[in-house]
């Protein structure tokens, strides 16, 4: 039995997983958050080192070349996101680590860690609702919005490949369900 506990929260963009991840982090103090590296621009409310490590393309590439990235994806054209080995290594054995990553990245982590990883897929109630949420968020250009929606359709098709699916129709209920899944895994 390994003591590594890796929890992966994955979902189409706009399904609400980042909100759920924040609530989970507040509720389970022993859990650490894996801060990913990305080449996308920081949004106004984001902090380097807390939400992401915001890197130039060159810096990101050099992390990858040095083998410091566990998995990475070009989640949107020209925008790279990657899980850092250093984030997962110690945190996974020290109370567990939570990753908030895209669907393909989640597959890679599951392939790498098997039963040490539990992948929870957060599904929006419907594609209509997802579209509405992404529009309302207003952080993306029309083109980025379109790309995110196209990608979401593909990701929804993969929902049944994960360890559990949490439907985010009601945020409080979805957080409760996610907490239950995580607590069960952490105590297993
Ligand atoms: P956003 O730009 O909205 O913060 O994130 C876009 C997508 O990239 C989300 O689905 C997010 O979970 C995913 N993402 C964030 N970090 C990583 C990572 O390290 N690896 C992968 N594969 N996806 C990530």
Image (cartoon, rainbow, N blue to C red):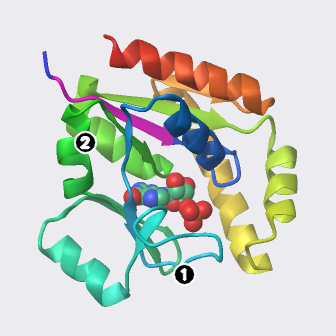
Q: Is mark 2 within 8 Å of ligand 1?
A: no
Depth order, front residue of 157/169: 169
Q: Position of residue 77 (x, y in %)?
A: 53, 77
Question: Does the magenta-highlighted stretch encompass residue 8?
Answer: yes
Q: Quadrant of residue 8?
A: top left
Q: Is mark 1 within 8 Å of ligand 1?
A: no
| Mark 2 and mark 1: Cα distance apart in space | 26 Å
Q: Secondary structure at mark 2?
A: helix
Query: What residue is pinned by disc 1?
Result: 41
Which labelled disc corresponds to residue 159? none
Depth order, front residue of 156/14: 14
| 10 Å crowding of disc 1: few (<14), some (14-19), many (20+) | few
Q: Which residues are magenta?
A: 3-9
Question: Does the magenta-highlighted stretch encompass residue 175?
Answer: no
- Left or right: 62 as drawn, with respect to 105: left
Residue at the image point whose x is 26% and y is 80% from the top: 61
Residue at the image point whose x is 36% and y is 50% from the top: 34
Q: Secondary structure at mark 1?
A: loop
Q: Position of residue 161 (x, y in %)?
A: 47, 29
Depth order, front residue of 172/108: 172
Query: What residue is pinned by disc 2?
Result: 91
Quadrant into which the C terminus falls: top left
Q: Are marks 2 and 1 in contact (CB under 8 Å)?
A: no
Quadrant into which the N terminus falls: top left
Q: Position of residue 46 (x, y in %)?
A: 57, 69
Q: Position of residue 94 (x, y in %)?
A: 22, 34
Residue at the image point whose x is 43% and y is 78% from the top: 39
């Amino acid at each position: 039995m390994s003591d590594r506990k890796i929890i992966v929260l994955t979902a189409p963009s706009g399904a609400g997983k980042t909100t759920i991840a924040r609530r989970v982090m507040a509720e389970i103090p022993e859990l650490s958050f894996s801060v990913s590296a990305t080449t996308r621009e920081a949004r106004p409310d984001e902090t380097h080192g807390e939400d992401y490590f915001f890197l130039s393309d060159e810096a990101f590439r050099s992390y990858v070349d040095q083998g410091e990235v566990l998995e990475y994806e070009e989640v949107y054209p020209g925008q790279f996101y990657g899980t850092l080995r250093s984030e997962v290594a110690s945190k996974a054995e020290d109370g567990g680590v939570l990753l908030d990553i895209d669907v393909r990245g989640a597959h890679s982590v599951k392939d790498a860690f098997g039963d040490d990883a539990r992948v929870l897929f957060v599904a929006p109630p419907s594609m209509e609702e997802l579209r509405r949420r992404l529009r309302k968020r207003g952080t993306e250009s029309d083109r980025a919005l379109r790309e995110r929606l196209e990608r979401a359709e593909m990701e929804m098709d993969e929902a049944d490949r994960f360890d559990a699916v949490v439907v985010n129709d009601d945020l409080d209920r979805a957080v409760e369900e996610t907490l239950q899944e995580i607590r069960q895994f952490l105590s297993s």
